[in-house]
Amino acid sequence: MTKEKAQARREHLARMRADQKRKERRAALLMWGIGGLVIVVLVALVAVWVVKDRSGKSLGAVKSFNYKGSDHSWTKVDYKENPPVGGQHNYYWQNCGIYDKPIHNEHGVHSLEHGAVWITYRPDLPKAEVDKLKTIASADYMLLSPYPNLPAKVVASSWDHQITLDGAEDPRLPEFVKKYKQNPTYTPEYGASCTGGVGTTSDQPLPPPQAETSQEPMPSASPAS
């Protein structure tokens, strides 16, 4: 082989190796680029999910009120809110628990004064959603009852606070319960009992008036239905 041919062969091999290295670099850059893009997309998706999750659980829609506690009455009360969140109420509080019939507002409000969260739902709410609400309301200091003419599918109320919800699966419901149930900051009679009251429903009469005293009467215990 002449020197010229040998030199040409070496140059050809060098070009082939250079081309191969360029291809490998391009492939590596492409892989890194795709990998980086995938990472960016995943980070963005996680960020969107986190923001959406936080937004879905936000209690920014909670309405606040300003009612004083310890204002008792033996008569029916005309409440401004539906359901009520505070104000004058019956001397007897509602035993916390699950009710399949509406309860008297006056008893429910008294339980709110003791730190309970009262979950109300439209009477036509599907059974599966009602069952979900019953699971949530199975804890202490919880009230659950149907409520005619409710402004939303589900409404959660505590003393001076209320939120309308899209249904039993609304992620704001457990957040509301966690924040407001037996919260000493918002509960006028923090530590007061949510048992030993009455378990009557609204199709039964309110208790008859008794002598006015500075102390709450001691009702006979009546289990919730």
Image: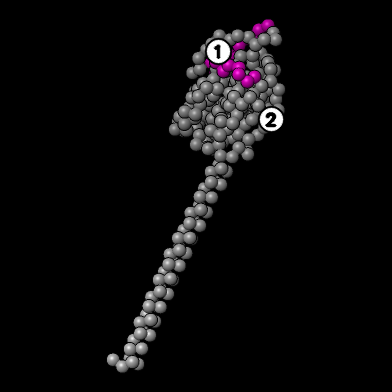
Residue at left offset 48%, top offset 60%:
36
Residue range highlighted in magenta: 189-211
Residue 109 in view in this figure: no
Q: Which residue is mark 2?
A: 65
- Front-lying residue, 90 or 45: 45
* In the depicted structure, whether residue 127 falls above or below residue 204: below
What kind of residue is marked 2?
A: Phe
Residue depicted at x 56% and y 21%: 103
Rendering quarter of residue 177: top right
Q: Nearer the viewer, residue 104 or 108?
A: 108
Outermost residue to the left:
1
Q: Which mark is residue 196?
A: 1
Q: Secondary structure at mark 2?
A: loop
Q: Residue at x 69, y 17 (%)?
A: 70
Looking at marks 1 and 2 on the same chain, the residue that comes earlier in the sequence is marked by: 2
Instruction: Please state the horizontal and vertical placement of residue 50, each as a whole percent of the image.
Output: 53, 46
